[in-house]
Amino acid sequence: MVCLLLAAANINAQVMQENVDFNVWPKGELNTAFAKYFIGNSYLAPLDAENGGPVNVTFEPRCRNNWHIHHKSVQVLICVSGRGWYVEQGKEPVAMRPGTVVAIPAEAKHWHGAARDSWFQHLTYMTKVEEGSSTEWLEPVGDEEYDRLPGGEPALATTDPEFMERFDAFAFGEVSEQVKDRLDEHTRHICYLATLLGCQGIDAYRDLLPAALDKGVTPVEVKEIVYQATAYLGMGRVRPFLDVTNSLFGQRGIALPLPSQAQTTMENRREAGTQAQVGCFGEGMRDFWKNGPDDSRHINRWLADNCFGDYYTRTGLDLRLRELITFCFLAAQGGCEPQLKGHIAGNYHVGNDKDFLIAVLSSNIPFIGYPRTLNALNCIREVEATNAK
């Protein structure tokens, strides 16, 4: 069993190289000379040693150097591959991705190293070097301190390699292969984010959001998914996802607030929302806001002016994608079958047909499980049966 776990861990370590191509940026030799100042393995590849040029430093996942200070010199780090962190005492950690540049002031106490689930490569060189410059190595960065970084719990690939190997093979291998003809990567990741909001999978959302951005889901699209979820989940359940999104955007250097996507005012939102309802469900919704018992008619008005007028009218997502993410919200949270059937019909109206919705459900099985998937599938079958009459 131990051998199997070690083998699985090695497989996951290879997977975690994440865009680190050692043919592009050389890994170099094991950093034995400075090993006592590192936790984990690092590697050094001088790029122009004869002339004192920059050195490419490679860190394995979770590897980091000790706290240290460069006296009378400035160190420059340029991330060229993978993901890592720069941490300066008294300041917020800086997430490093390819292209991130950090100039470390002389006398600043700091450390740098790889993310928990990725290899990391940065170029480093010294500048503004004064006479008497030196490096003072200090205390190690222990696991407890390291794991306080955002998303800093140990990666499941490290703690549960056997489980994650099987989960990843199913979710991102077998399942994605099944749906690839109906769902492109961009749409599939939009559905993942909406589904994880619906089932309150905030930790999985935190893990998948970077991949969604890498697959082409724009920051505006992400925010629109989160905003619209408020109408179907409530602010009490959406707020933590908004915080996670803002935190990750900050790490990636995405300036907030994003450009406004609002297209309505408080004065015209009801009319615009009604038009959005008509666009999703047909002319039968034209006067829906006026209908219903006297004691609850205001809710139908709010559906028009708030749910549809405040959210569906925004740019960033078209009506087809807005109905699709609503389908994901409702299917994932369960217990909303009447509303889910209504929005299945809405999806049909905007062009998301039965086979497409089944592909979406199939793609989301790893995140919501079989019972909610089968309940949603039954809703599709019932809508199909009604339409056939």
Image (spheres, rainbow, N blue to C red):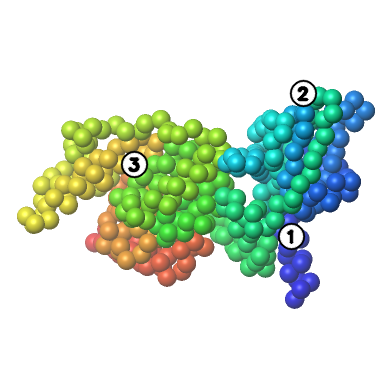
Q: As shown in the figure, which amino acid type bears the numbered disc 2?
A: Lys
User: The C terminus appears in which quarter of the rendering?
Assistant: bottom left
Quarter assignment of residue 11: bottom right
Local packing at callout 1 (Cα closer than 10 Å; few below 14, some 14-19, many 20+) is some
Type of amino acid at the residue the image marks with label 1: Ile
Mark 2–mark 1 Cα distance, whole angstroms, equals 43 Å
Q: Nearer the viewer, mark 2 or mark 1?
A: 2
Comparing 316 with 356, the one in front is 316
Front one among 305 and 206: 206
Which residue corresponds to mark 1?
Answer: 11
Badge 2 density bin: few <14, some 14–19, many ≥20, Cα 10 Å: few
Tags 2 and 3 in contact by the CB under 8 Å rule?
no
Viewer-nearest of discs 1 and 3: 1
- State which mark lies toward you, 2 or 3: 2
Reading the image, the residue beneath label 3 is 319
Whole-percent x and y of residue 21? 76, 42
Instruction: Say whether disc 2 or disc 3 marks the residue closer to the N-terminus.
Output: 2
Tell me: residue 217, above or below residue 337.
above
Residue at 55% across, 35% down: 253
Percent position of residue 372, x then y: 40, 67
Taking depth in this image into account, of 43 and 72 the one nearest to the observer is 72
Q: Which residue is at a point 17% across and 52% down the rendered structure image?
A: 299
According to the image, label 2 marks what residue?
128
Name the N-terminal-most of marks 1 and 3. Answer: 1
Residue 297 on image: x %, y %: 11, 52
